[in-house]
Image (tube, rainbow, N blue to C red):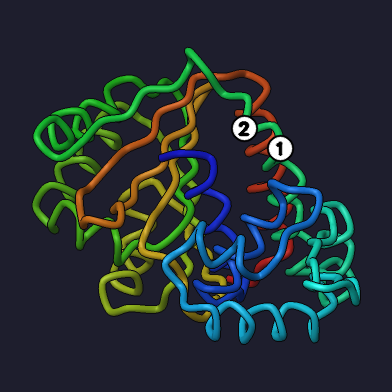
Amino acid sequence: MQAYDYIIEKLIGIGFSEGEAIIYTKLLSYPSVTANFLQKQTRFSLAGIYKILDSLISSGLVLTQATKPSVYKAIGTNLLAKRFEKESKKMQRISRKLQDLTGLMSINEQTEIYEDEELVNEYLSIPKKINDFIWCVGSFEAVINFFGENTEREFIKTRCSRGVSADAIIFDSSKCSKELAGRDRGEKRETKFIGIKNYPLNFDYLFGDTYLNFHKDDEGKLRMLKVKSKNLANAKLMQYQALWNSTCK
């Protein structure tokens, strides 16, 4: 998963529309641009671009200058994070994700990407590599959608057989997610739910110095981003712990 796509998914996860996330992320890449420039860089019509820009301006996320033609500029991620920090304790935790986006841009040789054919075997090998604990964060509905119940049960069985416990922060309240929480005690896990509307169908795992993200790309192909980085793992751990502490059962 490229950093650009990662940022878009995380913005959608905290309430941006898809169009707002795409345009805002584009704006972050340039000092200032025109609507015509954005139209050439995206799949949106010019009218659609103006509608999205108006929404972002109304939210205080984009600034415009009355030149001819008008130019637009996004507020920085630090300012955006501060805006979300004022809304609620829960959003304070989520906003911290934004502050690590710049760091994700520099991920290089530590990154691997797995696709459809190799993913199931790689997925089932994960619990064999964990020594003590794993974080599971995102949509459990996506786990079932991507791998199916049988594969997921095999994953959990292997994890439990090795004495590895888990904390799960689940974004959805689907039937399969509630059933998962109901099995917590027998499956060495504690689950908390966080209500996010229009949550993206992806999920993250974190163990040791390894971060994994599972998602489907624009063509519907299942992908896994694997990053081995002590610094990134520490940053994600702080985020997950803060989100956990601010989330009710």
Q: Which residue is mark 2?
A: 105
Question: As displayed, is residue 175 above or below residue 227?
Answer: below
What residue appears at the point 46 percent right and 39 percent down from the top-left corner? 2
What residue appears at the point 80 percent right and 67 percent down from the top-left corner? 71
Question: As displayed, is residue 90 above or below residue 27?
Answer: below
Q: Quadrant of the N terminus?
A: top left
- Answer with the quarter of the image where residue 213 lies: top left
Count of picture labels: 2
Expressed as whole percent of the image width and height from the top left, the position of residue 221 reads: 20, 49
The residue under label 2 is which amino acid type? Met
Q: Residues within 10 Å of mark 2 (few under 14, many from 20)?
A: few
Q: Which residue is mark 1?
A: 102
> Are the residues flagged by discs 1 and 2 in contact, CB closer than 8 Å?
yes
Q: Quadrant of the C terminus?
A: bottom right
Q: Residue furthest front?
A: 68
What residue appears at the point 49 percent right and 35 percent down from the top-left corner? 206
Expressed as whole percent of the image width and height from the top left, the position of residue 43 reads: 42, 67
Residue 112 as seen in the image, left or right of residue 102: left
Seen from the viewer's position, the closer of residues 52 and 11 is: 52
Seen from the viewer's position, the closer of residues 95 and 89 is: 95
The residue under label 1 is which amino acid type? Thr
